[in-house]
């Protein structure tokens, strides 16, 4: 996993404050916050999905800009890019979005939050900086092909 300095550096480039990135890093890497949630409050399909509780918690911290949710996804994307066997950066980002991201979050009767914009913004930033990100995460240039 990338260290927090790498996470903070890319968070800054994504327009995420250092304090927001720090809080999100702690939530993801230490995770004890989840004890504050009642599983029965989650829709049935999410009662065993920790992502639901993390995203809901982070969304509530800043619903106007979703900066905490964006920082959450950036952290997980950087982790995924570091750990995946997929060596094409864009393919790895798409794999994360398609298979690991919780894009829609139902939070009430007929209320569903959608975080596609945040994920698309991050995918764009990563695409534009893919060689530098790969180098930061792997210490080398991305493989050819």
Image (spheres, rainbow, N blue to C red):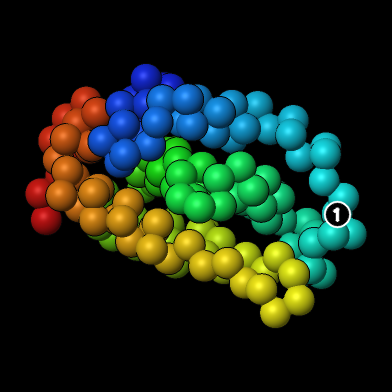
In the rendered image of this protein, does residue 23 appear above or below residue 50?
above
Between residues 48 and 8, which one lies in front from this camera angle?
Answer: 8
Along the horizontal axis of the image, is 64 left or right of 84? right
- Residue 61 found in image quarter: top right
In the rendered image of this protein, does residue 31 appear above or below residue 102?
above
Question: Which residue does the image show at 83% across and 39% down from the upper left?
Answer: 36
Q: Is residue 6 visible?
A: yes
Q: Label 1's element? A: helix
Question: Which residue does the image show at 16% across and 35% down from the upper left?
Answer: 132
In the rendered image of this protein, does residue 55 appear above or below residue 44?
above
Where residue 52 sits in the image (x, y, percent)? Answer: 67, 55
Along the horizontal axis of the image, is 100 left or right of 43? left
Question: Which residue does the image show at 66% across and 52% down from the upper left?
Answer: 56
Which residue is under mark 1?
Answer: 39
For the N terminus, the image quarter is top left
Where residue 65 sits in the image (x, y, percent)? Answer: 46, 50
Along the horizontal axis of the image, is 19 left or right of 82? right
Between residues 13 and 31, which one lies in front from this camera angle?
Answer: 13
- Residue 47 found in image quarter: bottom right
Kindly give the residue lying farthest to the left in the view shown.
144
Q: Is residue 2 visible?
A: no
Q: Residues within 10 Å of mark 1 (few under 14, many from 20)?
A: some
Kindly give the residue lying farthest to the front in the view shown.
64
Between residues 105 and 81, which one lies in front from this camera angle?
Answer: 105
For the C terminus, the image quarter is bottom left
Where residue 24 sits in the image (x, y, percent)? Answer: 54, 33
Question: Which residue does the image show at 38% across and 37% down from the upper left?
Answer: 16
Where residue 107 sits in the image (x, y, percent)? Answer: 71, 65
């Amino acid at each position: 996993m990338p260290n927090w300095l790498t996470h903070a550096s890319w968070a800054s480039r994504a327009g995420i404050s250092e304090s927001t990135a720090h809080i999100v890093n702690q939530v993801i890497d230490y995770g004890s916050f989840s004890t504050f949630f009642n599983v029965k409050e989650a829709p049935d399909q999410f009662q065993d999905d920790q992502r639901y509780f993390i995203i809901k918690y982070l969304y509530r911290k800043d619903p106007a800009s979703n900066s905490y949710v964006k920082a959450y996804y950036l952290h997980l994307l950087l982790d995924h890019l570091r750990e995946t066997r997929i060596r094409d950066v864009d393919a790895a980002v798409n794999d994360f979005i398609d298979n690991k991201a919780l894009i829609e979050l139902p939070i009430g009767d007929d209320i569903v939050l959608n975080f596609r914009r945040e994920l698309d913004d991050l995918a764009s930033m990563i695409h534009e900086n893919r060689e530098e990100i790969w180098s930061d995460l792997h210490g080398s240039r991305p493989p050819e092909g």
